[in-house]
Image: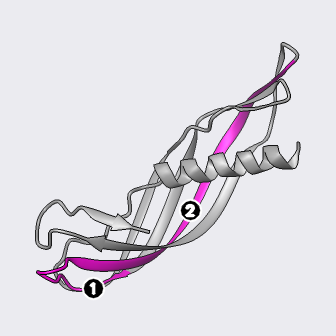
Amino acid sequence: MGDVMKLNLVSIGACAALALSGFAGAAQADEGGFYVSVGGGLVWNDDVEAAGSTLDFDSGYSINAAIGYQTADDPDGGRIRGEIDVFYTDADNDTFTTGGVSTNVGGGLEQTGIMASGYLDFLPGSVVRPYVGA
């Protein structure tokens, strides 16, 4: 498998993991402090096409866990949070097609990653808390 195809596989899996991992949110308490969150989801990888060949994937799963710290609610500015998130995704290969001939293939796409995130929560004290993050 070529380097570009491997990079595409990794990129597709990473995007799916980020998009479908559990939406980790901080506790809704007004005071600051540490928090822990866990999540999970389904992963649907796009088919990978290169040089007239196609690699199909079965759906898979994603799990994640995060630990973070949040400041206390500020009535004028909301709340600031920062967290470290660890995730794992797994999706099996389904079929490989080339020249009109398909075959079942083994193996799969597994990823483990870690990322740091920062958030600014709006509307302090409300039930719904919109936020922006990076």
Count of labels shown?
2
Q: How far from the left and from the top, in percent, is residue 118? A: 41, 75
Q: How far from the left and from the top, in percent, is residue 18? A: 51, 55
Q: Which residue is mark 2?
A: 87
Q: Chief secondary structure of the magenta span?
A: strand
Here the colouring is one colour
Which quadrant would residue 78 be assigned to in this image?
A: bottom left
Q: Is residue 65 left or right of residue 131?
A: right
Q: How far from the left and from the top, in percent, is residue 49? A: 76, 30
Range of residues picked out in magenta: 69-98
Q: Residue at x 11, y 66 (%)?
A: 126
Give amino acid for label 2. Answer: Phe
Which quadrant would residue 134 be assigned to in this image?
A: bottom left
Per the image, is 75 magenta?
yes
Q: Nearer the viewer, residue 24 or 8?
A: 8
Q: Nearer the viewer, residue 41 or 126?
A: 126
Q: Is residue 81 left or right of residue 31?
A: right
Q: Residue at x 13, y 81 (%)?
A: 76
Q: How far from the left and from the top, in percent, is residue 108? A: 74, 43
* Above-or-below relation of 119 to 8: below
Give amino acid for label 1. Answer: Thr
